[in-house]
Amino acid sequence: MKRYLALFLALVMCFSLAACSGGGASITDDPSAPGGSGGEKEGSEQSYNTFISAEPSTLDISRRMDSYSSTIMIDTMEGLVRLCQTGEGEDAEYEMRPGEAESWESNEDGTVWTFNLRDGLKWQDGEPVTADQYVYSLQRSADPDTGCPNSFFLEPLLNYPAIAAGEMDVSELGVKAIDEKTLEITLSAPKPTFIEMLPATVYYPQRQDIIEKYGDQFGSEAEAYIGNGPFKVDSWTHNNSIVLSKNENYWDADSVKLEKVTYSIMTDETTYYNAFSSGQLDMVTVTTKDYVEMFQGQDKNYAPYLSANLAFNFFNIRDELFSNVNIRKAFTLAVDREEFNEVCYDGMRVPTYGWVVPTMTVGETNYRETAGDNIKVMQEELAAEGKTPKDLLLQGMQELGLGDDPSTLDVTFSFGSTNTLTRNIGEYLQQVFKTELGVEIETSFNEWGIFNSNVQSGDYQAGFMGWGAYYNDPYDTLSLLLTGSTAINTGWANEEYDSILNAATAEMDEETRMQEYIKAEQILINEECVVSPMATNQVQRFFQPYVKGYSDLGFTNTGSKYIYIEK
């Protein structure tokens, strides 16, 4: 089965990190199949109870950067296109479906794209959706004063780099409304994966009147937010729950069966495992073998998939210690990723040795299989020289004039969660760095909002976090480290990396594009070692047996749209 074939035809695309918290759904033309127009029994209560494991930072498209926010926004917003699923199980394949754009076309060289919006599009309050609102949204995300963490998705647009650098006004961005129903986007160069970049990123409309009304509070409360998607936010009880209801003004409301979706905010694994076991939750993601085996022994539907979510360490190169590349390499190569996976994840993730996750392809060619395992090669080369990661650390300390006693170093690793799993990861890293490097690190655990604020302000030394790819092309994750990107605020900038990556994304020949991506990743990992990839998430999902219409594929971004209850 060629699951990624559709991803590189004209109609295909990506997932986000958002769907990573677990709830995609399927779509099909067969009304008797999940996601079709039929299937649920009369009298079934169409209410779906799920969870997210942290408070969303914001529901502002131009300012959100975490999966928790994205999960809610996928359910409550609609963009130009959505990546859906056709078929089930081993027959499941990706398929790009029109969203608010009923059709689109490009000029001959692929630099000008015209999107034709549907008739009668409405926001949840009944106001019309127009092409001007897409223009406003993209300009707002491009404006450096907004500080959009995902603005790198606008990199292909004409004049974006100059706008991001403050050298050109946002009105010069390559986007305009031909009329109320026609949106034109102009690229600076052909981009073979442009359509794949659109779903679940920043290519949504936004309401200028609502944003100006609420100012900085926009997206922080249910009443200070507005959507145009399958559901609307009814209530948001912070650190407790977010309740959605069906949006009757949604253009495709007939395909939405659920009347209510409740996202409980549960930070403790045991709490949501127990809630699922007792029937309070309809879906759960599991991180330990014991619970996988327990739920497999119950009347639950098991629906695992290998995601595009990467867990990694990262370094603040503006910090005196981690400004040194040998010290960054020491902390990267000291970790045995196989052991890390077994100890921290109970062997349920995939040890990862490069920045591009194992699920990524260029065309139909798997990237990781072609590029090899960067960090594993670095570890082997170091061992062949008769050296250890501690030797690199001592070399770096000498270069910085810090002596030769690693125990004197003050190092703090920051984490964006306080749950048991995250604390276990912190304890493991403490042990590894003490044993392998002689460094006794401190650990700092905070809720995501505080952690993210500290990272964005540069108030950290090193940290651990996860990121999920939005679409199936290595540019998605490699672009996170482009100069000026605030997605992962390491403070790193490299002109050669930028040049190679920006040329690669416009390269039409797949083999050449592959080799350019490999060069860029080698700069990022082998030469500079700015980030330290650790593991790719194997999502272990369970659903109650009456839940239907969820996705079998990890990249879909349909959220709860096609889920329904059949009791």
Image: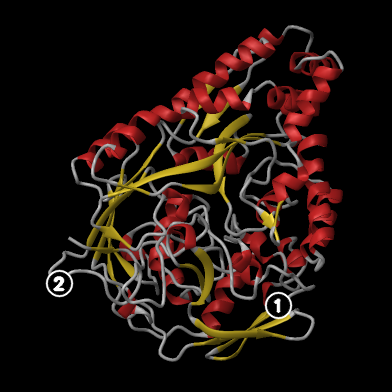
Pointer 2 residue:
42
Pointer 1 residue:
174
Callout 1 secondary element: loop
Q: Nearer the viewer, mark 1 or mark 2?
A: 2
Q: Quadrant of residue 41?
A: bottom left
Q: Which quadrant would the C terminus be assigned to in this image? A: bottom left
Q: Is residue 44 left or right of residue 380?
A: left
The residue closer to the viewer here, 513 or 149, is 513
- 379, above or below 243, in the image: above
Question: Which circle marks residue 21 in the picture?
Answer: none
Say which amino acid is labelled 1: Gly
Q: In the image, residue 64 lies at what x, y percent?
A: 50, 56
Say which amino acid is labelled 2: Glu
Q: Residue furthest left?
A: 43
Q: Is residue 490 left or right of residue 414?
A: right
Asked whether residue 218 is in view, the answer is no
Asked if labels 2 and 1 touch by Cβ distance under 8 angstroms, the answer is no
Q: Quadrant of residue 529?
A: top right
The residue closer to the viewer here, 296 or 245, is 296
Q: Residue at x 42, y 56 (%)?
A: 71
Q: Is residue 422 left or right of residue 498?
A: left
Q: How is the image coloured?
A: secondary structure
